[in-house]
Image (cartoon, helix red, strand yellow):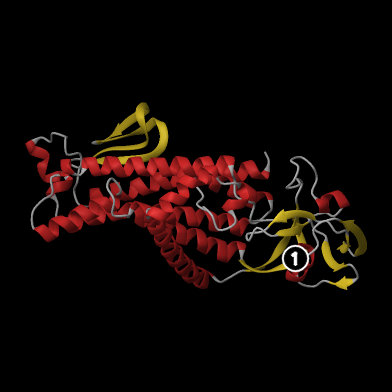
Amino acid sequence: MSGGAIGVLLFVATLVVMVMIHEAGHMTAARVFGMKVEEYFFGFGPRIFSFRRGETEYGMKAIPAGGYVKIAGMNPYQTVPESERSRTFGAKPAWQRAIVLVAGSATHFVVAVILLTFSFAVLGRPGNPTTTLQSVSATSTQLHGVPGPAEKAGIKAGDRIVGIDGNVISRWEDLQTYIKARPGTPVAVKVDRGGKLLTFTVTPEQVTDANNHPVGRIGVSPAIAQNKESLPVAAWDGVKGVGSLIVASVQGIVHLFSPSGIGQVLSSVTRSQAARGSGGQSAVGLVGGARLAGQAVETGQSQSLVGLLALFIVFLGVLNLAPLPPLDGGHLAVLAIEKIRGQPVDPRKVVPVAAFVLSLIVVLAVAVMYADIVHPAANPFQ
């Protein structure tokens, strides 16, 4: 199995596991407060299989688009026997209901802290890029299936670039600057391969940068110096890292649901790959995330893979807290309105709003998925 396929599978597996952990958070909190949990399922639609343990039915459904926990009384159209009314969601104090609603997203932040802590303590915190090559891309950006400039010239992963056109190279930034300024111009690259100095003639291919300017590229990625942290330091950095991801996610979601954000997402279906990387629509969905995970594994950047997984986990957790029905945050907003008004909100009146919001989310998700497939963003790991 290729590295790219492994990365995609890891991304998908992480999302599936995170869905179930999220719902387990709701279920655990509900049980702590004595609520009746009737169902715990992965997926929606027709049942594939299920089994019952106690009063809860567990199982899997045909459409793998998430998961859910069914707590007695949350469905406004459900008839609850009088004997069980005290165990329904609505019968509990507002603070208990709020904790149950928040518990799902809270698991996202805990898991993300664990992932980042593992990354910083075990894999190491990425330091400065070195001139030793982590990978040499096997495919040109211009012609699929054609070796990239460095590979075509004979440069291999593990080589350490020590000079270019007679100039000593000791920093990755100097190599990047030199190559970017010479698209289409042959350069002499000197490498140290196991103590033996070799020189290769490489012609950088021309690509477009984020500002739509032509730059050179030879298709190599640097090995990154790794600085492993002690567990206490790694844990604290993990907490701070998740805090930063939460702030970035909130800003991204506010923009996403703004008129300009919605317009950018919808227009992404007609934008080119270059436009996505030049200040245009840059939202990445599940398809794009899976592709990025595959690219991270292919280039050996394990820390980037863990960071990507943490980013998606945190983003989905924050999105679920957005004050929009039918998201968990929408239910929290209803609780806040009830507290302010001093009387319950008829949940049936929330259904049309939830249907509209869900439709909008589906439209945006489809648009981003289309852009991910037809106009994929450039590989950031090269």
* Count of all numbered marks drawn on residues in the image: 1
In the displayed structure, 52 sits above or below 166; it is above
> Is residue 13 visible in this depiction of the protein?
no
User: Closest to the observer: 312 or 263?
Assistant: 263
User: Closest to the observer: 222 or 177?
Assistant: 177
Quadrant (top left/top right/bottom left/bottom right) for the C terminus: bottom right
Quadrant (top left/top right/bottom left/bottom right) for the N terminus: top right
Secondary structure at badge 1 equals: helix
Rendering quarter of residue 166: bottom right
User: Closest to the observer: 70 or 336?
Assistant: 336
In the displayed structure, 8 sits above or below 194; it is above
Residue at 31% across, 45% down: 357
Q: Position of residue 91 (x, y in %)?
A: 12, 48
Is 233 situated left or right of 93 in this image? right
User: Closest to the observer: 338 or 274?
Assistant: 274
> Is residue 80 visible in this depiction of the protein?
yes
Q: Position of residue 25 (x, y in %)?
A: 33, 50
Residue at 19% across, 52% down: 334
Q: Position of residue 211 (x, y in %)?
A: 63, 61
Is 194 situated left or right of 283 in this image? right
Rendering quarter of residue 60: top left
The type of residue carrying mark 1 is Gln
Q: Position of residue 171 (x, y in %)?
A: 76, 72
Q: Alpha-carbon neighbours of circle 1 within 10 Å: few (<14), some, or many (≥20)?
A: few
- In the picture of the structure, the residue carrying the numbered disc 1 is 176
Is 44 situated left or right of 269 in this image? left
